[in-house]
Image (cartoon, helix red, strand yellow):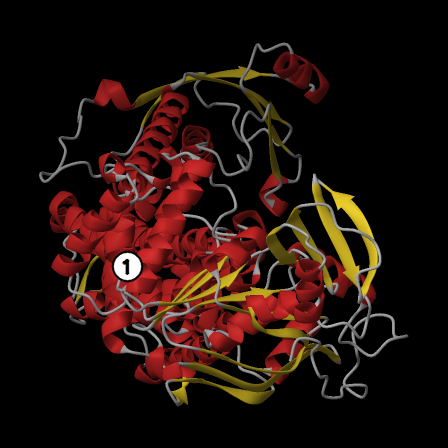
Amino acid sequence: MLQVRSVRKVYDDRAVVNDVTFDVQSGEIFALLGPNGAGKTTLIRMITDILRPDAGSVLLDGKPIGAGRGVRIAYLPEERGLYRKVPILDALVYQGELKGMTARDARAQTVALLEEFGLAAWAKKQGSALSKGMQQKVQLCTALIGDPTLLILDEPFSGLDPVNVALLEEVLKRRRAAGTTVLLSTHQMNKVEQQCDRALMINRGHMVLYGTVREIRMMYAENAFVIEGGEVPSGIPGVKSISRVNGATKIQLERSAKSNDVLRALLDHGVDVASFTPVVPPLEDIFVHVVETGAGLDQGKSGPPTVDEMTPVTGGGR
Amino acid sequence: MRFSLSRAMIIARREYSTTVRRPQFLFSLLFTPAILMLVTFVTGKLQGDSIRKHQHEAKVMAIVDSAGVYTNAPSTFAYVMPIDAPAFPTGKKAPKVDNSVSARTVPLVLRRYSDQKVALDSLNAGNVTQVVTVSQDFLATGNLRMYQKSQQLFSSAGDDRAVRHWLTRYLIANSVDSVRADRVLELGRSMDLYTPTRTGEYAIKDDARELVSFFLPFILGLFLATSIITGGQYMLQGLSEEKETRILESMLTTVTPDDLMLGKLVGLGAVGLTMVGAWAALGLYTGSGILAFAHIDVPPTLALFAFVYFLLGYLFYGSLMTGIGAIANNLREAQQFAMTFTIMNFIPFWLLTPILSEPNGKLAVVMSLFPPSAPSTMLMRMSACSTLGITIPVWQVATSLGLLALFAAGALMLSARIFRIGLLLYGKTPNLPEILKLMRKD
């Protein structure tokens, strides 16, 4: 659905986004990850045609992104607000009309959205009269009105209590089931693991990880397994070390060992194996590791690359 | 420019409907003319009362007559004030004038002193209201001095008609008969001044008409300038709110910056036009009596020119405000920037007296050709000339409109570029070199 091809944006001789290429498939929830200042917002602004790339292209269903303006893309920025002195119903109808809806349709959909988010009773209240959480939900309604095909949400969970987080997750699932594609930018890695199909991580403007969430996590797996069941004796071929972790047994495999061979050896030794689970680091640990080590970037540099230094980078996850 | 007319019109409609429902709009709409009328009425009334009070006060004049020309003059005298035209026409009918002689008689009492110092001591002690010294060589040189305690700024030409009348009357009393003396004393007053009317015919110059010919251009110019700036101020407020709350950023996935700019300009221009229209209707309703009393016909072309100058003036200032609103970080900064331009619009009001006293003079012409001050100056000139019965050369009107249109188009194009760049700038407000750098990159 969305094709981003070698986009680059340079400010003051610094490449804020450098040669980034990725696809977002129709109907998936795609995560855009990266530390603060990595270039995520600039990348999103190029995807939404607010900024023009200095090089590269952004296509929506094979057409230049500008063609989708007004109808197909909705963007909820991280820092956001509402019209303070305008009733939320009017503000939402206005956004709907700008997206090409008639006033009547926009009003009908606004009422439905407010119902969905539990805000129907507040329809005639001004933005300033709402709590922060309510404002957050109204802002989501602003993005959802007009049924965009590509929904770009920047930190949509921030400011929401657990009940509303669950509500938003449910809304996203419903939208996805209805065919909406979601591009989610967030620092909440557990949400990415739970919600997203694929992810892209950029650091200092470069792609450093790209793939399905599972692929990315498996790339950083330790070649270790957690076994629940009986005691693991020493001397099992291919097992380098054995330790206890939270009441279970963790075995570290030798570099050349294959997990199937080790499992067979454990069973041959009469070990009771109730579960045999690979040790995969959480996405959060991978995120911290990649940022701290600069994985995927040329090592030994300090600060973002200059224009002259820009070279294509192969991300660690590709 | 890249815009969709339908989206721009949705924005325009929304800007208009939300702005005209704001309490501050209603306040401006109703209170601006009310305050203006109140201030005009109160200051006029106070000034008139003050003048009348001083006119009718008894005067005790000390005279030091070194030339001896007033030796035989009487020590008491009743000066009959001439009847003035009413200072401020206040209704549809001409106000009644009080013709009673007693109400307009100023008693004058003379005290003779041989020594100027003693006379001045008497003035300082408050025993006399003024001292007149007639020098020894008065008949040869005409040297005459009057001393009095000043109570007002610029009062050197205060109402000393009673004293002058006494001095003149008794200077010639022994030389001409009383009839000729009366004619001499009334010579200035009995001579009617005829000036051309709008149709080119000569008619008696009318004080009331002259007064209206001052206030009408002033009020029209002020309303025009206020409505132009009001639209711009709403632009600043709206843009600042949308930028601060980042509403603009999410809107830009739906609309182009040019859609936004055009929609806002049209919507808020309509707000300014509504304001002008309402004021014009109110002015015609309440002021028609005054205009009729002063025999002034406001030509319909004046309304047409007011409309054209409003459109171009608003386009010029509204565009500038759009650029400023997009670049500034918040409303406070935006208003600080905008102040410079707002002042340019009001410069003609600081130069009101020279412009209106000579509406085809050099200053008035220059100010009406200079685009930032052209709308209010030209409208003031047009209404002043209309009431005075003179015309503005066509080339001046054409040049003024042409230059203003050129500047408005330039401001629109420049602001459109600044607007596109500025919408996404957050943090420190950029300075001019930074803006130019960003514009080159855009």
Q: Is residue B204 visible?
A: yes
* Quadrant position of the N terminus of chain B in the picture: bottom left
Q: Is residue B205 visible?
A: no
Chain identity of mark 1: A
> What residue sits right under mark 1 in the picture?
A145
Q: Quadrant of residue A16?
A: bottom right
The residue at the point 80 percent across, 66 percent down is: A237
**Residue B116 rendering spot, x and y as whole percentages:** 69, 22
The residue at the point 11 percent across, 46 percent down is: B285
**Residue B97 rendering spot, x and y as whole percentages:** 16, 30
Near-viewer residue (B252 or B291):
B252
Query: Taking B436 as reference, is B263 above or below it?
Result: above
Q: Amino acid at mark 1?
A: Ile
**Residue A152 rendering spot, x and y as whole percentages:** 44, 65
Q: Residue furthest right?
A: A300
Apparent side of residue B198 relative to residue A250 in the rendered image (left or right) = left
Query: Taking B142 as reference, is A198 above or below it?
Result: below
Apparent side of residue B126 relative to residue B105 in the rendered image (left or right) = right
Near-viewer residue (B340 or B105):
B340
Q: Quadrant of residue A224?
A: bottom right
The residue at the point 50 percent across, 67 percent down is: B323
